Image: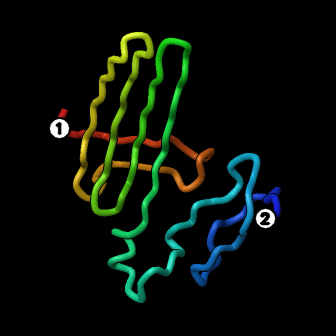
Amino acid sequence: MQKEITESGPLLMPSGKLAHIGWARQPLLDGNLSAARIYPGRFMQTYRIKRWDYYAVFTPLHFLSATIADLGYAGNIFVYILNFSTGELHEEGLIIPFSKNIHLPQHPNSGDASFRDHRR
């Protein structure tokens, strides 16, 4: 059985290993993914770390879902809405090379996830 994490702290130790193993009732750990040690060289690590914010809203009539993701080599932004009564699904998405202009905070309570498209 895993233990409950009740205090805030970093997700990773300076060595790159997990600082805490367990679960929490709310976001407590800082996602200090810059401490990750996937490869000996730091260059390729950027393309292996995946981060995202996902949001969903249910009502009796609709389901709305939105995601902003930084996949390292690309960003993915999408939103869709499903009408339960008609079965109609509408979705829109963007693929952003190298996740350019996507910002995801290190801790979910420390800032906003955002994307800025400077072409518009």
User: Horizontal placement of 47 versus 2: left or right?
Assistant: left
What residue did someone put label 1 on? Answer: 119
What residue did someone put label 2 on? Answer: 2
Q: For the point 51% across and 35% down, which residue is it?
A: 55
- Asked if 83 appears above or below 74 in the picture, the reply is above
- Asked if 35 appears above or below 96 in the picture, the reply is below
Task: Give the total of numbered labels.
Answer: 2
Considering depth in this image, is 54 or 90 the residue closer to the camera? 90
How far from the left and from the top, in percent, is residue 57?
53, 25
Closer to the N terminus: mark 2 or mark 1? 2
How far from the left and from the top, in percent, is residue 90?
30, 23
Q: Helix, strand or loop at disc 1?
A: loop
Considering depth in this image, is 89 or 103 the residue closer to the camera? 89
Contact between labelled residues 1 and 2, with CB atoms less than 8 Å apart: no
Determine the image quadrant of residue 6.
Answer: bottom right
**2 vs 1, front mark:** 2
Instruction: Tell me how far mark 2 sits from mark 1, CA to CA.
Output: 47 Å
The quarter in which the C terminus is drawn is top left
Amino acid, disc 1: Arg
